[in-house]
Each structure stands twice: as C-alpha cells, then as structure tokens.
Image (tube, coloured by chain):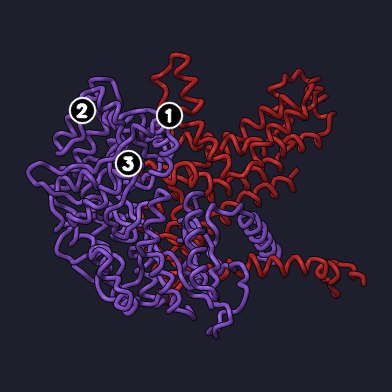
Chain colours: A red, B purple
Amino acid sequence: MNVSAQTGANKIHRINITPYLFILPAFLFFFIFILLPVLNTFRYSFFDWTGFSDEVFVGIKNYQELLKDQTFLTGLLNNLKFILFFTFLPIIIALVLTALLSRRNLWGRNIFRVSFFLSYVMPMVVVGVVWRWIYNPVFGPLNTSLKSMGLASLAKPWLGDFSLAFIAVGIIATWVQYGYCLTLFMAGVQRIDESLYDAAKVDGANEWYQLLHVTIPGIRSEISVALVTTFIAALRVFDLIFVTTRGGPGSETIVTSLWLYTNAFQINRVGYAAAIAVVQTAIILLISYFLLNRSRGQEEGD
Amino acid sequence: MNIRKLLNFVLVFVFVIGVVSCTPAAPVEPAAPVEPAAPAAPAKPAPAAEVTTLKVWDNFVRPAETAIMEELIKNFEADHPNVKIVREAKSMDDLKATLALALKSDDSPDVAMINQGESDMGAFAKASLLTPMNAYAEKFGWYEKFPQSLVRLNSWSADGSKMGEGNFYGIPIQAELIGVYYRKDVFEQNGLQVPTTFAEFEAAIATLKTKGITPIIFGNLDGWPAIHTFSEIQNVMLGSREWYDNFMFTTGTVNFDIPENLKAAQTLKKWAEDGTFMANFAGVGYDDAYQLFSAGEGAMLLTGSWLSGDLAASPFIENIGFFVLPPDEKAGYKLTVGGTGFAFGISAKSKNPDLAAEYINYLYSEKTAQDMLAAGFLPVYPLENVEISDGLLADIVAGWNMLNTTDSVGYYMDWVTPTMYDTITASLQELMGGKISPEEFIAKVNDDYVKGLEAKGIK
C-alpha cells in the first residue's frame, strides 16, 4: 500500500492504516484506563457526589465555588511558587553540573551521574520520610550538626516554622529534580558537535562563555522537556507534602492536590474534588502547550 | 485553526495526560472495591452441617492489636463450630478511604469498624448502608451495659442528619481518654504531687521550668495533637458539660464564640510561647514526641491512653504514671476528651445480620474485656473489681472508670463538621505560631461551625 505522491493541488488519496493497527492495543489500554476515567472525572465535576450515594446534578456550581475558595487559591499560589524549587533551581544547578562533568575525562564521571540521578528515582514517599527526619529539630542530623558547630540559634523547627517550612519543602523538591535534569542535559550535550566548541575556543571563549553560547543553545530541546516535566511536577505535587507537612503549618504548604484529596476522601465531596482536578489539568495543559510549542518553533527556526 | 494545529494540540493533550497520569500511587489506596480473601464456602443460610462465613473488617493493625483480635476470633470460632470469620485488618486511613465503596458493593463485609461522626457513620446512615441495631440492643441488653453518652455518639437519625437520636449503628470496644503521662521520679525529686486542681497543675509547670526541666513534651508537626491539648484546657475553662453537648450535637443553641473558649485559646498561646512545651515543638512529629518522653525527656506528656502499650517499652516504665487533667477548683468538674475507637457495625447488605450481631455481642462482653485488659488495652465494657498489676494501666483504668462514674466522657471536637478537622488543625498551628490572635482563632473556628450549621439547615 503506497501513499500517492502529493503535489500542490493533490492531497493523500489512500491512508496507510498499518501504523494505526500497531498502536491500537496500546491506545485501547490508554483509552480504557486513562482517557475514559479522565473524561469521567470531567463529568463528575458537574455533580454533587459523596462517592457512595446518589449524584446530584449541580451544573457549574462547583467551579463557581472554586473561584472563591480561599484554600484552593492559596494552594494554587503555592503550586506556582513551588515552580522556583521544582524547575528553575534544578535546571540551573543541572546546567552548571553539566558543564563541569561533560566533555572531559573526569575520573568517576559515571559514578557522579548515577549518584546524582538516584535522588530522582527514589519513591517520593521515602524521600519525604527521610527528609522529615533530617529536619527533625531535636535529633535530626541538620540541627544536631548546627548545634555541634555552635550555631544553635540557626537550629529551627524547619517543617513547623511559618517562615521556613515552604523553603524547607522546596529544597527537598530541588534535591529530587536536579538529578533528572542533569541526566537529560548530559545526554543532550553528547549530541553537540565538538567543532562548535573548537570554533568558540579559537575565538578565545572561556568555559563560562562556552556554557552560555554553545552548550545551552545546543541542548535547547532537552531544556524544554525538563521545563515541561518539572512544571507538571510542581503543579501536581502531592506525596511530598502529604508526608512532610500535610499542608501545614497553618496553610503555608497546602497545594491543590492535597485539597483535592481532602475533599475526595475526608469530606466526601467527590464532585468538588473532580472540579479541582479538571482545573488543575487545564492549567497544566495550557502551560505545557505553550512551552512545547515555543520550543518546536525555535527548532524549526534553527 | 488548521488541521495541523489541532493535531498538534491533541498530541500535546495526550502526552500531558500520559505524563500526569504516571503518578506513583498516593499513600492511600484508591477507593476501588476491594476483593477480600476468598471465603471457604459461599455464605448461604446454613443448615447445621454447613459453614457460614462472616466477613469482618477492623483496624487493629499494630502488632499487639492484631494479636489480641486474632485470639478473640479464634475463641469465637471455637464456640461456634459452623462459623468461619474471614478477617481483614486495615489501617485507619485505608479503612476510611475504602469502606464506603465496599459497603455499597455486593461483596460488602458483614461487620466493619466505622468512624463516628458526620463524614463517616453519619454519611453511611444517610446512604442507608448500615443496619440499625436497635432491635439487637434490646435483645442482648446492650443499653444496660453501654454508657448512655456513648449510645448517643453512635446513633443517627434515619436520614443521617442528626447525631444522637434515632437508629443505633455501632458499638466500639476500645476506650480511650486524654490525660497526662508523668514521670513519678521527676515529680518526687522536685517535691511535686499529682495535681488535684488546675491551679496546682500550672504551679507544677512553673516549678519544673525553674528547675530547667521541660514541663510538657509535645510535638505538633502533624497538626492534630494540638486539638487534644486545646480541648483539655477548654474543658477546664468550661467546668460543665452543657455547652459541649449542645455544640457537638448541633442543636443550634450555641456556637463557638464564648468567653471560656477565648480563655482557653489565650492559655494555649501562653504555653506555646513561655516554654511550657518543649523547644521547637512546631517541627516535631507526634510519634517523635512520645519517643522522646519514652527515652526520658521532660516530665509530662499530655496525650491519649492509646500509648500505654507502646510506652511499656520505655526504660523508665516503672516510673511512668497517668492522671486525668484536674478541673478548676471552683467548678470541681470537667469533661475529659475521650471516647472510643471506631465502632463495630453491620452492613445493610449483610446476609447474616443475626450472626453479625452475635459476633458484635461477643466482642462487647465481660470475657472479651478481660482479655483486652490482660493484653494492655482499655476496654469500653465496664469491668468491676479488676486486679491490674501493671501500674500505668491501672492508672488509666482508674481514670476511665472515674470518667464513667462522674459522667464526664468528653468529645473530639474535630468531628463536629466535615471541614472542622482541617480548620482547627491549621488554626491551632497559626495561633501557637503567633500568626493569628486568640480572637481571630475563635472567629475562624466559629465561622466553620456556623457554616456547618447552615449546611444542615440549622440557624
């Protein structure tokens, strides 16, 4: 089966269906277990439902309530603030480390790469539990070492402190994400033609200049993938908050996913939780679409 | 938008949905119908030779807890040769998340442990998922053996709107109360006695501070421990039970904004700031806090009797006692936060409700209570003339008996509206962290309560 040639006026007459047959099983799985529940969630958001009794149709009432919901809005703001710790800091750290580790015969380079990546592959719940212990003000290693160095005044109740809890949790997020970005970037650097670096060196460029003007532009697509996935991670973070602070102290670290969980499983408002899910997904989609399209445009322009 | 851009958008949508859906599971099981272990035989109405299966869900998951439950089940099966109990133990969070759908399914457990309060027992009552046990209560004489205040807490009107009246839905077997664990040796060394009034308690705190000993070990990173601490102070200020009864049963005659609650908030704030609690308590988890006390830190620990089993591992156990927080001298009476664990109830879909009731009757009996006590657990069933060698448990049982004879078993106020738990945990953290004033605290909590009343159509 061949595709007939296209000319300016002619379009494709016969479509090759073989590729579609290949992806059909995977697509069916995707459809039944992912797409269908997503569409169902969208449907539930228009109902008032406890999860086990009868549903009551309420139209867009859930969404209207959501717009005025202080807890949700605070959560959303926190999600956006977390972008600093999930996206920007990890990417910057990863770029610097990439420059240090790539393109040279550094002994133990692979050991570094693997150990930096380990933080990303650990289950988030485990990460949360361990860091909760690290931050323990009485016997956690952070405060114990601060006290032994004579800096007892800096030994704060990290996760319970109103000014510091958000940053403390953010640091954990950066610790998790930077290894992932680093791995992406180091793979990307290997694609860059060495002659570009040679040309730059001939022009008298130092390491810093090479990083800014050769490496970073060269791994632009990896950076945009990192941007999108870390953005999504920041917007849907749940396990980390659940295990460390549960949204506290007060509502300093509450995020939209946590509020969704509370509504669905503790307050028995599954319809409202579905509305939260829909809004969350819409925001993620919007940002992702914007980011991915921008990068594609830039690539085509190269 | 041309076809290319549309396809573009769809591909992005699919990619993002795929990524977003690739979540590691949240720490709680998703609420899907759960398949318990396959029963030996289908549960038909049993002629004498056939085995009837009873499916039971409970939350006795800790090692000592599951051991006692398994033993109780073994004894029941020994007395009832043609009955087989198929048991599933689930943690509190798991039980809460999965029970609703399980009760709705045809594979529902016959007997399950249900959390009291509007979000659980009340909601299940409203959805007609539970069998009312009033007839069984009459048959087995439960009303005589069960404190009246507890009957009210486990009863809901048929439409699930009002707690305290109507249908009786569950019997809890494990009791709990909030009190003060204290180090007898530390008290002795500093010339302190078990306080009999709240003023004496505060004086003891002052003395301990001057000696450089942390008066109360406390950790509020988890948010909820402060509810118990606050409620106990509240109970002292109230000096009677009338307000709390009306508050918890949403009669509409009271709200949260009363001077006694303000005084309690001010006292709690003072304790948070003047060194009554351990340093940096805001960043310490509940489990970490009691471990610290167990390891020898501080003089007192204000929390629930449920820790008695775990404190037995402390090297200082010989010197750990328990007293109920004393009332204000003038009032001479106070409620004490307490109550029970989850209640055993019968699913509306059970095919063997009579057998289920018999099982529950067995669980709430003198023999079972004695077994529980021997294993270090506080039973709800009122036992008289019991010999307890374990000093700490003896203190706790004495406390529980005192509460029952003086009719002063109090309440967990986070039950009162579906959103109260979140509101009060956050507000207490803000109060103790100096972010809101006691007046603002009262206003926030009252706001939640009034909204809860309005949602029920009560003004």
Question: Residue B148 is drawn in which quadrant?
Answer: bottom left
Q: Amino acid at mark 3?
A: Gln
Q: Residue at x 14, y 39 (%)?
A: B197
Q: Are marks 1 and 2 in contact (CB under 8 Å)?
A: no
For this orientation, the residue located farthest to the right is A1
Residue located beneath label 3 in the image: B429
> Which residue position is annotated with label 2?
B192
Q: Position of residue B210 (x, y in %)?
A: 23, 20
Is the N terminus of chain B in the top left, top right, bottom left or bottom right quadrant? bottom right
Q: Residues within 10 Å of mark 3 (few under 14, many from 20)?
A: many
Does the residue at mark 2 contact the one at mark 3 (Cβ under 8 Å)? no
Q: Please state if A208 lies on the left or on the right of A125 as rendered.
A: right
- On what subunit does the disc labeled 2 rest? B
Up-down relation of residue B81 to residue B390 (above or below):
below
Q: Closer to the observer: label 1 or label 2?
A: 2
Q: Nearer the viewer, residue A67 or A215?
A: A67
Q: Are marks 3 and 1 in contact (CB under 8 Å)?
A: no
